[in-house]
Image: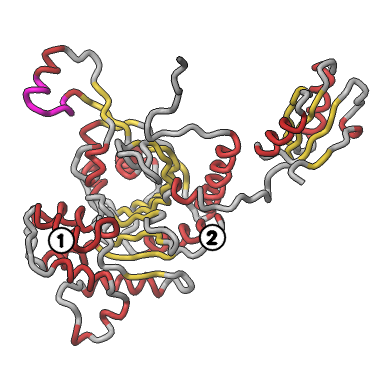
């Protein structure tokens, strides 16, 4: 019995029409990013395992695919089994995001880069996720980052370019959620969370949208943050907004006013952009140091992208601090939300030819049409012509024309619209 042949679990094949749809969206994203002054780079799909497991990636480090060393011996396997350290068998790993590779890239090439470097990275990443709707083990990230700019201009450029990209894609109704890691530190401090538990506590709070305040409180208790009233405080935090500092005599004890005023300044510098303050926004990556942001959509309970400031990461590789900030669009989540757009696409036609038409004649017709900017495909005439035309229409072709031995040139072709 023949076996079902499928891609690896959590990974996908893309048929031509879907691939074309994805590439159109990617071309729009690249175009807007470039217009805003960003330059595209490329990094390897693998990085040193030690870099991918340097304590910067939060829970994503646990999801990294490891690449085993060459020439592993039975003794190596036995030693790894005894120590329980499976990573001792790996020296490389597939990247789980594009930020760690960018930090390494900058440390490698800093001398050849401008003082303030604006980077585009659009590429696949890999995580050993449990596959489910909207979560894959291989997916594309679309990142823009600014390295070397310590002031708020970096955040403003990233937010402006991202909003412009969403507009160009025709994705309406999006809002930007803002927070700052200093505010989160204030919340944890008001709860008495010790320093050694703070990153684990933030990873748990990041699950608020998924498991709710009671679930977060219960999970915090299991890691040692057992404080009465946490669930109720989380509900109050979720309802907080820009009004918090309206009355300076009644500012919450957990609110870092410097950080909050920085966020207000960002909001005020983006007139017309819907920006919300959300003190429960975490962004689970351990490398964020200041401002953090996400794209929210009213029809979807998950973010469509996000990012923030990560001023200490590059210093881990370079040996000196360099300010950095980035924003990533969740490409896999937004591409299915986009309406199909035909503008700018070349006319696509199918030449349905009889079997006795000479190949050289077909190529002459094709050359004439391609020279005029038309996309051309050959299809041999079959008995089930309707089935053939339905298939090429589904592939995105606009029209077809029959070709016989009596066809003389492209001008003599009689095109008939598809999908009419």
**Residue 113: where, in percent of width, then height?**
39, 44
Q: Where is residue 114 in the image (x, y as percent from the top left)?
A: 40, 48
Left or right, 405 with respect to 182, comes to right
Q: Can residue 110 be seen in this view?
A: no
Instruction: Kindly state the secondary structure of the residue where label 2 is placed.
Output: helix
Residue at 79% in and 22% down? 363
The answer to which of marks 1 and 2 sits earlier in the sequence is 2
Rendering coords of residue 108 (x, y %): 32, 37
Return the residue at label 1: 217
The mark lying in front, picked from 1 and 2, is 1
Dot 2, how many residues are within 10 Å of its Cα: few (below 14), some (14-19), or many (20+)?
some
Left or right side of 129 for 410 = right
Image location (x, y in percent) of residue 215: 19, 58
Query: Dot 1: what SS?
Result: helix
Residue lying at 76% horizontally and 22% vertically, measured from the top left: 380
Which residue corresponds to the image point at 81% horizontal and 17% vertical from the top-left? 355
Could you give the CA–CA distance between mark 1 and mark 2, rounded to whole angstroms? Answer: 38 Å
Nearest to the observer: residue 91 or residue 240: 240
Main secondary-structure element of the magenta-colored stretch = helix
- Look at the picture and state if 404 lies above or below 387: above
**Residue 383: which quarter of the image?**
top right
Q: Do the residues labelled 1 and 2 touch (CB within 8 Å)?
A: no
383 in the magenta segment: no
Q: Quadrant of the N terminus?
A: top left
Which region shows up in magenta?
A: 79-88
Q: Circle 2 sits on which residue?
A: 167
Left-right relation of 266 to 21: left
């Amino acid at each position: 019995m023949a076996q079902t042949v499928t891609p690896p679990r959590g990974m996908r094949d893309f048929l031509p029409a879907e691939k074309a749809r994805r590439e159109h969206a990617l071309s729009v994203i690249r175009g807007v990013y470039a217009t805003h002054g960003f330059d595209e780079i490329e990094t390897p799909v693998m990085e040193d395992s030690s870099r991918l497991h340097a304590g910067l990636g939060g829970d994503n480090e646990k999801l990294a695919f490891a690449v085993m060393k060459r020439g592993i011996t039975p003794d190596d396997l036995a030693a790894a089994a005894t120590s329980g350290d499976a990573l001792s068998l790996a020296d490389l790993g597939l990247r789980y995001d594009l930020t760690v590779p960018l930090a390494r890239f900058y440390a490698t090439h800093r001398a050849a880069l401008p003082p303030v470097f604006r980077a585009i990275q659009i590429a696949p990443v890999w995580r050993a996720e449990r596959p489910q709707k909207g979560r894959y083990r291989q997916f594309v990230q679309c990142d823009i980052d600014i390295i070397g700019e310590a002031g708020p201009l970096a955040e403003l450029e990233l937010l402006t370019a991202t909003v412009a990209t969403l507009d160009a894609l025709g994705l309406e109704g999006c809002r930007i959620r803002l927070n700052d890691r200093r505010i989160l530190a204030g919340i944890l401090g008001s709860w008495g969370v010790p320093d050694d538990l703070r990153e684990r506590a933030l990873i748990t709070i990041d699950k608020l949208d998924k498991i709710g305040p009671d679930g977060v409180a219960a999970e915090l208790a299991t890691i040692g943050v057992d404080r009465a009233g946490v669930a109720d405080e989380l509900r109050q935090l979720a309802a907080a907004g820009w009004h918090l500092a309206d009355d300076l005599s009644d500012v919450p004890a957990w609110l870092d006013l410097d950080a909050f005023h920085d966020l207000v300044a960002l909001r005020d510098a983006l007139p017309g952009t819907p920006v919300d303050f959300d003190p429960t926004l975490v962004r689970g990556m351990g490398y964020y140091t200041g401002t953090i942001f996400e794209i929210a959509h009213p029809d979807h309970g998950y973010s469509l992208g996000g990012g923030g400031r990560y001023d200490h990461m590059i210093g881990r590789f370079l040996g000196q601090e360099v300010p950095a900030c980035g924003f990533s669009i969740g490409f896999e989540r937004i591409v299915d939300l986009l309406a199909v757009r035909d503008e700018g696409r070349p006319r696509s036609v199918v030449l349905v030819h009889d079997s006795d038409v000479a190949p050289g004649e077909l190529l002459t017709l094709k050359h004439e049409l391609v020279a005029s900017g038309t996309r051309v495909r050959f299809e041999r005439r079959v008995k089930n012509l309707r089935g053939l035309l339905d298939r090429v229409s589904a592939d995105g072709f606009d029209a077809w024309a029959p070709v016989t031995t009596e066809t003389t040139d492209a001008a003599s072709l009689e095109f008939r619209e598809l999908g009419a």
